[in-house]
Image: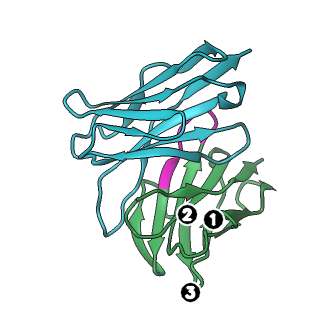
Chain colours: A cyan, B green
Amino acid sequence: GESVGLHLPTLSVQEGDNSIINCAYSNSASDYFIWYKQESGKGPQFIIDIRSNMDKRQGQRVTVLLNKTVKHLSLQIAATQPGDSAVYFCAEATGNQAGTALIFGKGTTLSVSS
Amino acid sequence: DAGVTQSPTHLIKTRGQHVTLRCSPISGHKSVSWYQQVLGQGPQFIFQYYEKEERGRGNFPDRFSARQFPNYSSELNVNALLLGDSALYLCASSSSPGVLRPFFGQGTRLTVV
């Protein structure tokens, strides 16, 4: 089916460590991917996106890697901070100017201890 | 700048009732999408509207409907509420009908009792 899955439901790291959150997608036609952060009681917050014509994109303390060969997406967070504790979702979409939908995975809960 | 705003933030309804949820997109954004997020799951797509026209519909029953107004705000309506409709309802806006960088509101927490 067309769904996005994550490898691990939870990830625990120490403050200052680098975190890697993984995501596998199944739709080879997907050409746009987004990572969201969701804190308890809030809506998803945009972190970073990447199109399928790229394999890496960097933001502030975050890097997204895309491997289309194995349909794998990852989010790397450098120097993880307690404020990074949240649920992280990857989402995929197929670009279509007529309108389309994001398909979300189940999420990975990141816990950062100080 | 104001982000996506949704109202109300919390709502409690009884089974069989009707509910209307409201969303105001980011200024300049013309596309609005609605998602349902059940506890412990990722958001699931319900509708997308652009320029007041429905551009996409997810796998939800006809009890769910939506519309977009000339000012690009949107309403999501749910009739004959079921206990299973209890969820966080999220609105996302983007500048175009394509999915490019949709930004989400804080959501409306609907509880059906």
Q: Do the residues labelled 1 and 2 touch (CB within 8 Å)?
A: yes
Residue matched to label 2 = B63
Residue A96, above or below A50: below
Q: Is mark 3 on a helix, strand or loop?
A: loop
State which tag comes first along the sequence, 1 or 3. Answer: 3
Give residue B38's position: percent from left, percent from top: 60, 41
Q: Residues within 10 Å of mark 1 (few under 14, many from 20)?
A: some
* Magenta stretch holds residue A91: no
* Mark number, residue B70: 3
* Quadrant occupied by the N terminus of chain A: top left
Q: Which segment did they paint magenta?
A: B38-45
Q: In which quarter of the image is residue A99?
A: bottom left
Q: Are the numbered discs 2 and 3 placed on the same chain, yes or no?
A: yes
Residue matched to label 1 = B79
Amino acid type shown at disc 3: Pro
Give residue A58's position: percent from left, percent from top: 43, 39
> Which residue: 48% across, 41% down?
A59
- Between A55 and A10, the one nearer to me in the picture: A55
